[in-house]
Image (cartoon, rainbow, N blue to C red):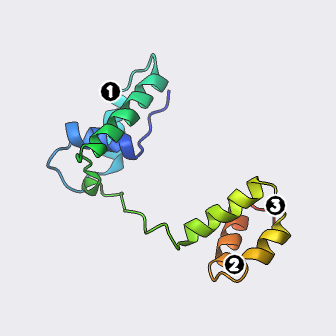
Amino acid sequence: PTAFVETNIRTVYFNHFFAGQERVADRDVLALVTQTMDKEQPRQWFWALMDYGAELKAAGKGQLGTSRHYTRQSRFAGSLRQMRGEIVRRMAQGQPLSVITQELRGDPRFAAALSGLQKDGLVPRA
């Protein structure tokens, strides 16, 4: 099994092993995750950690500011991420790229979003 760190797992370990510390590196969290993970049932272990981390956050105990690597995402509404999602959603619904382009090209975010999706290999280049 391969250990990994994601936001909810990070929350669990910050609350129980790094409480009060600042600028904790993910490599330190990963080392501890590797030591403590259930090697017999890793999938269930990580699911439980992710669920527990979500509960900690819901209870207001998320300490992601402790992480040296965590940055809060920018606002979604009106963002480039939102436009990328809109393009992908329409393509998943079967809309041709030509129709999507015609309908969305007036939005100033469209060209950059489409270019990024093409660069990432998620949308074919025309």
Callout 1 amino acid = Thr
Q: Nearer the viewer, mark 1 or mark 2?
A: 2
For the residues bearing labels 3 and 2, Cβ distance under 8 angstroms: no
What type is the residue that disc 3 sits on?
Answer: Gln
Secondary structure beneath label 1: helix
Quadrant showing the C terminus: bottom right
User: Which disc is residue 59 wearing?
Assistant: none
Circle on res. 111: 2
Question: Mark 1 or mark 2: which comes first in sequence?
Answer: 1
Residue denoted by label 1: 36
Residue 100 in sight from this viewpoint: yes
Q: In this orientation, does residue 17 appear?
A: no
Label 1, label 2: how many angstroms apart (C-alpha)? Answer: 46 Å
Q: Earlier in the sequence, mark 1 or mark 3?
A: 1
On screen, residue 120 above or below 2:
below
Vertical placement of 51 versus 99: above or below?
above
Q: Is the residue under label 2 in contact with that under label 1 (CB below 8 Å)?
A: no
